[in-house]
Amino acid sequence: MAVSDVKNAFRTAAQDRRIDAKEVDTILSSAGGISVDEEKALKDEAAKYQSQMEPAAQAKLREKLGEVGQVRSYAANVNRRVEIDAVKLSAEVQQLHTAGAATKSFGGTTIPEAVKTVVRDGLARGAIAYDVRELKPDPVYDTSHGEPHVTVEGKFNPYSQSQQAVDTLAFGYTELTPKKIADDMNTPQTFNVLKGYKQVGSHQVAEFERVTMKGNGRITELYDEASWSDTKARGPGGQKYASNFAILADGSVHAVPASRRSAGDPGRILTTASLGRDKQMLFNGHLHLEGGVVTYVGMSGRLCKLQDKGTAFVDPIAVLKAWGFEVKPGLTVTNEG
């Protein structure tokens, strides 16, 4: 946004010569990312319209503006940590993609030479390896989730986070390869499958059915807000993964579990950003499989916006083909932004 948007928001709110606390939400939201200039404009306009602001509105704006500097400082500290870690992580990527060397992915699979070539060529052409922990430098006023608050968003994914690589988020569990998918589809196994939900107090709880069957080689969207007692339980028809996926900097392909839960942080619903686990990424978005065949690859909206501004990313379909995945003929990446 811009300073002019802040001034216009104050002008609109003051048309009836009274600015209440609810209108403060609109004014703060008008700034978008609250830059230093926009922060100054908010303070200047608040002084200009002070006589028209109700006491509660004045107090609310003063409180929220007091948080902006703290949040901006927090983002700067996180980004400094990311910048320091990038030296080690970049060296790790370079070593893993050494031509002719027997190197293994984070999940323990030998990285094919074809995958190394795709990644090396992509990086050489300007594609980036990024860290989902990196934050945008300017705070935003978020009114979309519960009580409005000052926060910062991830640069590459809204849900910037550092997640433990344990349980269903162990690299070996989330890693997708053609062989792992084929083995899952060809091997009878016993596991829990989501049957439905029951209401317990004010919460929904997932219920399961114990079945023996083969995996179905299907990946599509799965989401709920229920609690899952079995984080490794599968979705309908034995679906093991949800569609949120990422290609990590080693070239390996990962998807969140069907439960979208991990014992490492049982209260969190897992997102694509959860797959970072303090490693760099090459791509993130959504992936669909039918019978083990890749039928859809979507680029996340945040990456789409960065791409529109000139940031380059490794071609995810080329990476999938290099691993040996069967890909639907003519498939191209869908921009989800």
Image: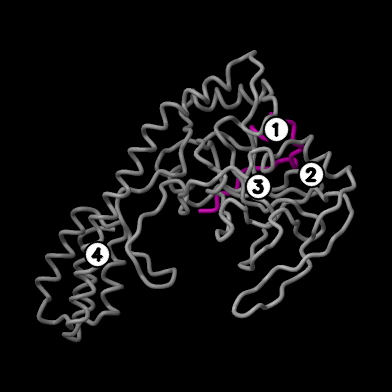
Instruction: Determine the CA span between mark 1 and mark 3.
Output: 28 Å
Residues rendered magenta in the picture = 318-337
Coloration of the structure image:
one colour
Query: Residue 330: horizontal and vertical position, in percent?
Result: 71, 41
Sequence-first tag of 1 and 3: 3
Element type where label 2 sits in the image: loop
Q: Which residue, given by chain and number where applicable, does mark 3 sit on?
A: 167
Instruction: Please give the residue where the numbered disc 1 appears in the rendered image.
Output: 321
Under tag 1, what secondary structure? helix
- Whole-angstrom CA distance, mark 4 to mark 3, is 46 Å
Q: Is residue 127 left or right of residue 29?
A: right
Q: Residues at badges 1 and 4 in contact (C-beta under 8 Å)?
A: no
In the picture of the structure, the residue carrying the numbered disc 2 is: 292
**Three-letter code for the amino acid on which mark 2 is drawn:** Gly
Q: CA distance from mark 4 to mark 2?
A: 49 Å
Q: Amino acid at mark 4?
A: Asp
Mark-to-mark CA distance, 3 and 2: 24 Å
User: Residue visible at 58% across and 17% down?
Assistant: 98
- Work out how far the residue at label 1 is from the one at label 4, CA to CA, in angstroms: 46 Å
Name the spot of residue 35 as percent of width and height, x first. 24, 54
